[in-house]
Amino acid sequence: MRYPLIFAYHDVSPTPRLSGNWVLPGVFKRHISYLLKVFQPLPPHALEFPIPTQGFMITFDDALEGVYRYAYPITEEYGIKGAVFVVTGFIGKRNVWDATFGTSVRHMDRSAILDLSESGWIVGSHTVSHRALISLPEGEIRRELEYSKKYLEDLTGKEVWAVSYPFNLYDRRVLKLAREIGYRWGFSGPSLKAHFTPLNVPRIPVMLIDLTLRPKLLPPWAVVDMLLTAPSRLTPPFMRARELLLNALRRRCCK
């Protein structure tokens, strides 16, 4: 068995798109039904370390609108609570920070985030702008972690003690600053490491191709997950290259 059983989703939607980081509502419901037959849901607000081996937790990065519209009713039906990690600079806006290839989607608005918080979900930070933290100077890393935390605390009236690192990328600087700012838990992506701390907890990614979660519980599948999620690390340089190209075209057109 592969632990911890903390699953990282991005979106739940019936609308097709040119991305693998989403699942259909019916598939998501099947996932939850299966997990509840085998494991116990971890209470998000009572998360402890070491993480219990017979529990599972559902998390969502980016706080996309489909999570509130389609995933939230299913979790309510089964009586479980999840965690949603919010990109505070894009609340209520489209995910233009991502390489969407013409199929951008909208992030939750403030009222949806507040509704999830009041229903018992963890509302955590996914930074302000979803930039890769390891590519930023220390001052910018601090701003991304600190400002997003304060924004969400002002919105929900609750302490924000969890962060999910964009693109699952972090280094010693990121962990140090996260600890200093007051985060007690930090979540990343798949890993082959046997040891981790509360500030770099690995998660099991769930994507469009995952019609069942059974294979993902096997230790060797971690290698597959790492290969499948590797392209997401190309998003920051891709978006930077696109920005440089667009700026060059603008300058040329304005001459």
Image (cartoon, rainbow, N blue to C red):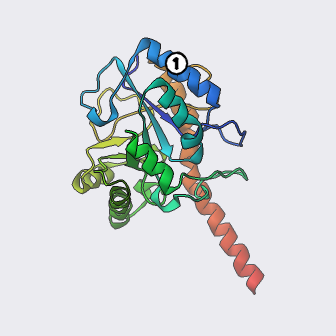
Q: Is residue 5 above or below residue 106?
A: above
Q: Amino acid at mark 1?
A: Ser
- Residue positioned 69% across, 74% down in the render: 248
Q: Tag count in the figure?
A: 1
Q: Is residue 195 above or below residue 164?
A: above
Q: Is residue 220 visible?
A: no
Residue 55 in percent (x, y) is at 35, 21
User: In screen coordinates, is 16 left or right of 44?
Assistant: right
The image quadrant of residue 185 is: top left
> On the rendered image, what quadrant is the N terminus found in?
top left
Q: Dot 1 lies on which element? A: helix
- Residue 235 visible in rendering: yes
Give the percent coordinates (x, y) of residue 217: 46, 18
Say which quarter of the image contains residue 57: top left
Task: Identify the image quadrant of residue 80.
Answer: top left
What percent of the width, then of the height, locates residue 201? Answer: 34, 35
Residue visible at 51% across and 26% down?
A: 77
In the displayed structure image, the side of residue 183 where residue 220 appears, left or right = right
Residue furthest bottom in the image: 255
From the image, tell me which residue sits under label 1. 33
Picture layout, residue 23 above or below residue 94? above
The quarter of the picture where the C terminus appears is bottom right
Establish if 19 lies above or below 224. Answer: below
Q: Residues within 10 Å of mark 1 (few under 14, many from 20)?
A: some
Residue at 39 percent across and 45 percent down: it is 117
Residue in the foreground of this view, choosing between 144 and 28: 28
Determine the residue located farthest toward the top in the rendered image: 38
| In front of the other: 237 or 24 | 24
**x, y percentage for residue 29?**
57, 24
